[in-house]
Image: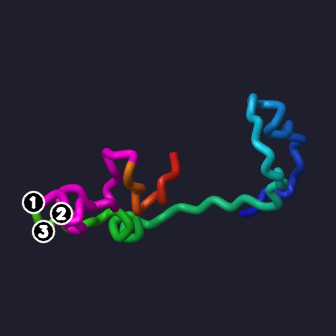
């Protein structure tokens, strides 16, 4: 289902005090959906097989207790799942 109506939403620069020089673009379409229980389970499971939090090089250990797919507790690393988005 796509929303086709223009709601005359104010531009973002009017809503915040950003000094960004990036070009703003208008959203042309937005689509929402519902995931099945199986899809949610498939996206949410990360098998943890090791109690070792970090590799020898200092990076988080995949399938360990600090698996980067579960998020990060350090500003030095990005979450693999959300790619560092806040």
Dot 3 falls on a residue whose secondary structure is loop
Q: Nearer the viewer, residue 71 or 38?
A: 71
Q: Is residue 52 left or right of residue 68?
A: left
Question: Disc 2 marks which residue?
Answer: 64
Give the residue drawn at x 80%, y 46%: 21
Counting residues from the start of the chain, the first of labels 1 and 2 encountered is 1
Using the numbered discs, state the Cα–Cα distance from disc 2 to disc 3 in whole angstroms. Answer: 6 Å
Residue 86: image location, x then y, percent: 51, 45
Q: Secondary structure at mark 1?
A: loop
Colour logic: rainbow
- Residue density around tag 2, few if under 14, some if 14–19, many if 20 or more, within 10 Å: some
Q: Earlier in the sequence, mark 2 or mark 3?
A: 3
- Residue drawn where x is 39% and y is 46% of the image: 75
Residue at position x 81%, y 36% from top? 13
The residue carrying mark 1 is 51
Please tell me the numbered disc located at residue 49: 3
SS category of the residue bearing label 2: loop
Disc 2 and disc 3 in contact, CB within 8 angstroms? yes
Kindly report the distance in space between the C-alpha atoms of the residues bearing marks 1 and 3.
7 Å
Whether the residues at callouts 1 and 2 have beta carbons within 8 Å, the answer is yes
Main SS of residues in magenta: loop
Look at discs 1 and 3 and give the one toward the viewer.
1
Q: Which residues are magenta?
A: 52-75
């Amino acid at each position: 289902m796509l929303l086709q109506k223009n709601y005359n939403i104010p531009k973002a620069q009017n809503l915040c005090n950003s000094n960004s020089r990036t070009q703003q673009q208008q959203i042309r379409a937005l689509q929402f959906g519902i995931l099945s229980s199986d899809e949610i389970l498939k996206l949410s499971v990360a098998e943890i097989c090791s109690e070792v939090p970090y590799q020898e090089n200092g990076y988080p250990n995949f399938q360990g207790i600090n698996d980067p797919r579960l998020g990060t507790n350090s500003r030095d690393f990005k979450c693999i799942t959300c790619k560092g988005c806040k």
